[in-house]
Image (cartoon, rainbow, N blue to C red):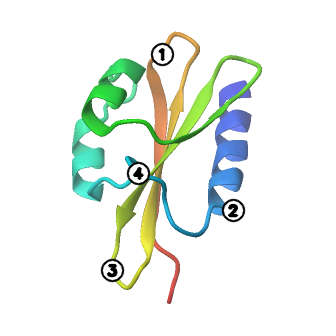
Amino acid sequence: MKTRALLLATLVLAGCATGQSTPGTQVAAERLATSIVPGRTTKAELLASFGKTKSIVFDSGFEAWLYQSPAGSGRFAEFVILIDPAGVVVKTRQRPPSAP
């Protein structure tokens, strides 16, 4: 239940993210979806494959990372990753780009 609350807070915060992304955060959506396996992919693997990105670290040790995927017309889809204190991906969520 605590994980669910953390994911909800992460998604709410990610929904507030707007504007230009910082270097290293843009990755093709297909690559993210096929490369990240909850329960198996580690934080170190994410860094090696996709580089640093926007992140939030919670007091509980969980982290939420946000990658963006170009969707055309200056829009981006968002891919949120929840990482447990041991450094393993727990859950992922994709959010399509907002309407122009």
Task: List x then y, in percent, for residue 40.
Answer: 33, 20
Q: Earlier in the sequence, mark 4 or mark 1?
A: 4
Reply above or below: 80 against 74: above
Q: Tell whether label 2 touches label 1 (CB within 8 Å).
A: no
Q: Amino acid at mark 2?
A: Cys
Left or right relative to 24: residue 82: right
Q: Determine whether the residue tagged by mark 1 lies in a helix, strand or loop.
A: loop
Q: Residues within 10 Å of mark 3 (few under 14, many from 20)?
A: few
Residue at label 2? 16
Q: What whole-number distance in Å separates the C-alpha atoms at marks 4 and 1? A: 23 Å
Q: What whole-number distance in Å separates the C-alpha atoms at marks 4 and 2? A: 19 Å
**Residue at image coords 36%, 19%:** 44
Q: Residue furthest right?
A: 59
The answer to which of 2 and 11 lies nearer the viewer is: 11
Q: What whole-number distance in Å separates the C-alpha atoms at marks 1 and 2? A: 25 Å
**Residue at image coords 69%, 62%:** 16
Q: Residue furthest front?
A: 23
Q: Earlier in the sequence, mark 3 or mark 4?
A: 4
Q: Tell whether label 2 touches label 4 (CB within 8 Å).
A: no
Specify the label residue 23 is tagged with. Answer: 4
Q: Determine whether the residue tagged by mark 2 lies in a helix, strand or loop.
A: loop
Front disc: 1 or 3: 3
Q: What whole-number distance in Å separates the C-alpha atoms at marks 2 and 3? A: 20 Å
